[in-house]
Amino acid sequence: MSQQDEWNKLEKYRTRFIQEISKNMYLYGINPSIGRLYGTVFFANEPLTLDDMSKELGMSKTSMSTGIRNLLDSDMVERVWQKGVRKDLYQTEEDWYKSFSSLFVNRWRSAVDDNLEAGAQMSRALEELYEQTADEKLKEAIEIDRTKLEKARSYYEWLGRVIELFENGGIFDIVPKQE
């Protein structure tokens, strides 16, 4: 096998891995094209500019800018500085645990807060309706809904404590990082 064939195999293996990463990025709320961008930056041997990324992926610089901003917001990539280079350079965050924790915390904290607020609003509305009605069957239905909302509130408060484990790093005392 020629040296070129060996290099081509390496690229093929990388491409296959990048495809798997991009296919599964939806789990983190990231679309596949941004997943491909992440994979490209991950396998780069040095930090990349938006121009480098655009050339590598055959996508517009605007798309690269939007994608890299999403990855920056998710703590999956970081902006780095190199002497003599005027353009912004990017590389993947080396601590995948940090990236996952940041993604998990940001997405789940928002969902938990939204669901707790929606439940509180519904509880207040149910309280008001309960006080206004004389319909005993409606009151029974309201009580059933209140019980369900209380169970939901308990769950979301528990999930909030799980999120806190990621925020404060306590999760790694329970499930240590693998080095």
Image (cartoon, rainbow, N blue to C red):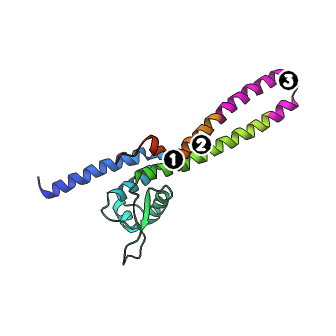
Residue placed farthest to the top in the image?
137
Q: Which residue matches tag 2?
A: 160
Q: Label 2 is placed on what type of residue?
A: Gly
Q: Earlier in the sequence, mark 1 or mark 2?
A: 2
Question: Does 111 sit above or below residue 132?
Answer: below
The image shows residue 4 at horizontal and vertical percentages of: 16, 58
Q: Earlier in the sequence, mark 2 or mark 3?
A: 3
Left/right placement of residue 70 relative to residue 45 reads right
Residue placed farthest to the bottom in the image?
84
Q: Nearer the viewer, residue 55 or 16?
A: 16
Q: Which residue matches tag 3?
A: 135
Q: Mark 1: few, some, or many residues within 10 Å (few <14, many ≥20)?
A: some
Q: Which residues are magenta?
A: 127-153
Q: Label 3 is placed on what type of residue?
A: Asp
For label 2, the SS is: helix
Question: What residue is rendered at 41% in x and 66% in y?
Answer: 50
Question: Does 31 sit above or below residue 57?
Answer: above
Q: Quadrant of residue 122?
A: top right
Report how far apart the C-alphas of labels 1 and 2 lie in the structure: 10 Å
